[in-house]
Amino acid sequence: MHPEWAKATEWERQWWAHCANTFGEEFKQLLYARKMGLKTFHDGKSPFNFDLEGKSVVDIGGGPCSLLLKCRNVRGVVVDPCRYPAWVYGRYIEAGIKINSIPAEQLEIQGIDEAWIYNCLQHTQDPKEICRRARQAAKIIRVFEWIDTGTSEGHLHNLTEALLNEWLGGEGKVERVNENTAAGLAYYGIFRGANYGS
């Protein structure tokens, strides 16, 4: 375990606070989703929906406002160790999304269609292990992460293109972005998991 992980997780929990206004992060998620290859559709109420066509998805580190909440036709699970207000868990239950409040390094799901990792690995104990477990869990892994950001109290790891390529077993795209209030050097892509094609 990273010695500062408990403090970093508490920092993250306090950053989210009561989770009442998550619009800023959800606005950024639209960029992450597009870069991860997800296509939106308008359901007559909102243009920000994703049709997963019955796929099973684990959202690693999805937080209180996972992209799964914007999905239709999905069997979803959020894995996130932070403790959020009770209403957040009720929202997931009402949406038919399971939530496992465990570190993603303990993920033991297998045989699912997709794993999603976006803007979370810098907070974790062992990002390499999470990528390994995601590759074991899913046929494909969709990723969007910020790289070359350095470390801080809530961000324990300085992710790089070389490290992520190694851990994910492929080559991601790197691009400087400044959109939807999300700005920085981005790494993203779709990667094959150990169960690809099965």
Image (cartoon, rainbow, N blue to C red):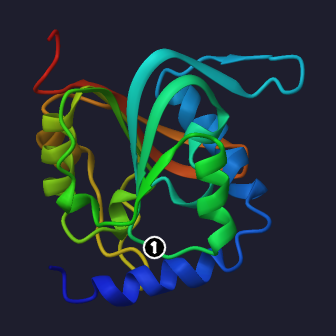
User: For residue 8, what is the image quadrant?
Assistant: bottom left
Which residue is depicted at the point 17% across and 16% down?
A: 196
Between 147 and 105, the one lying in front of the other is 105
Which residue is depicted at the point 27% across and 52% down?
A: 160
Which residue is depicted at the point 13% across and 56% down?
A: 129
Q: Position of residue 88 (x, y in %)?
A: 64, 63
Report whether residue 173 is seen.
Answer: no
Between 62 and 153, the one lying in front of the other is 62
Q: Position of residue 13 (x, y in %)?
A: 54, 79
Crowding around mark 1 (Cα neighbors within 10 Å: few <14, some 14 to 19, many 20+) is: some
Q: Position of residue 119 (x, y in %)?
A: 46, 53
Q: Amino acid at mark 1?
A: Cys
In this rendering, the answer to whether 4 lies above or below 172 is below
Left or right of 114 on screen, residue 76 = right
Q: What count of labels does the image hold?
A: 1
Which residue is depicted at the point 37% across and 69% down?
A: 123
Q: Work out which quarter of the rendered image holds the C terminus and state it.
A: top left
Q: Position of residue 130 (x, y in %)?
A: 21, 53
Between 132 and 95, the one lying in front of the other is 95
Q: Work out which quarter of the rendered image holds the N terminus and state it.
A: bottom left
Left or right of 174 on screen, residue 172 = left
Between 162 and 111, the one lying in front of the other is 111
Report whether residue 56 is seen.
Answer: yes
User: For residue 22, what is the image quadrant?
Assistant: bottom right
